[in-house]
Image: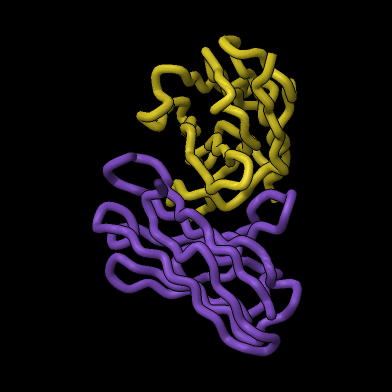
Amino acid sequence: QVQLQESGPGLVKPSQTLSLTCTVSGGSISSGGYYWSWIRQHPGKGLEWIGYIYSSGSTYYNPSLKSRVTLSVDTSKNKFSLKLSSVTAADTAVYYCARDGQGGTGTPEYWGQGTLVTVSS
Amino acid sequence: QSVLTQPPSASGTLGQRVTISCSGSSSNIRSNTVNWYQQLPGTAPKLLIYGSNQRPSGVPDRFSGSKSGTSASLAISGLQSEDEADYYCAAWDDSLNGPVFGGGTKLTVL
């Protein structure tokens, strides 16, 4: 069964770039036709999809964040990454990486444990 | 503002059956399947239902899902104290070309 684990700094200064990595185990990130997503949850709030990178390497971002988001994949290390630029306090959230299921729906089924990122000087 | 609409709260007594609704549109729920998640405090969402009405292995059959038109529902029968959690629905949105979520429903077991 696939497992995902987020890693990265827990504190980022305003205007800087937030960088997180998701390490995948139990399956190859480059096979199977899956959607590898980043999702965030502001404190006490609901879930917000940030973007996904497909197994082919193509990416798609939430239009609300598109100008600041870059997703990339390192197939040799079975990892994919998120970069969010020009962060503000409004980007403080728990960030999750996730993958959809075998049905190819794109909707997340497998989730990492999440990592809290605080934007503060 | 979440794309999918859920009631912010729901409650029930031990052993009771409760349902949580999720309302969407033709670009998401009508066209695609729905997932439901349970989120306990301080933990990641856990998949409860996928494909609108399928349970992953390990999820008790007390949990069931259904979909009709642009709405979906999660039903929990034989309510237990450990069911007290936040519940979210999600579906792919053809207009966004990505998944959309409900705002979450906080279930209280009285």
Quadrant of the drawing holding the C terminus of chain B: bottom right
Residue A39, position as x, y percentages in the image = 55, 38
User: Considering only vertical position in the picture, is B21 above or below B62?
Assistant: above
Task: Tell me where residue B70 sits by quadrant.
Answer: bottom left
* Residue at 59 percent of width and 24 percent of height: A89
Asked whether the viewer can see residue A77, the reply is yes
Q: Going by the picture, which residue comes out furthest to the top?
A: A16
Task: Tell me where residue A58 sits by quadrant.
Answer: top left
Q: Which chain is yellow?
A: A
Q: Chain B is drawn in which colour?
A: purple
Q: Which of B57 and A83 is in front in this view?
A: A83
As drawn, is B4 to the left or to the right of B104?
left
As drawn, is A76 to the left or to the right of B68?
right
* Residue at 55 percent of width and 35 percent of height: A38
As drawn, is A72 to the left or to the right of B14?
left
Residue A99, position as x, y percentages in the image = 57, 43
Q: Which of A35 and B19 is in front in this view?
A: B19
Residue B79, position as x, y percentages in the image = 66, 82
User: Considering only vertical position in the picture, is B43 above or below B57?
Assistant: above
Instruction: Count up the numbered dots.
Output: 0
* Residue at 45 percent of width and 55 percent of height: B102
User: Considering only vertical position in the picture, is B28 above or below A13?
Assistant: below
Residue A47, position as x, y percentages in the image = 53, 45
Q: Which of A59 and B62 is in front in this view?
A: B62
User: Considering only vertical position in the picture, is B105 above or below B53?
Assistant: above
* Residue at 65 percent of width and 72 percent of height: B108
Asked whether the viewer can see residue A104, the reply is no
Which colour style is shown?
by chain
Q: Which of B55 and A17 is in front in this view?
A: A17
As drawn, is B53 to the left or to the right of B13?
left
Q: Going by the picture, which residue comes out furthest to the left?
A: B26
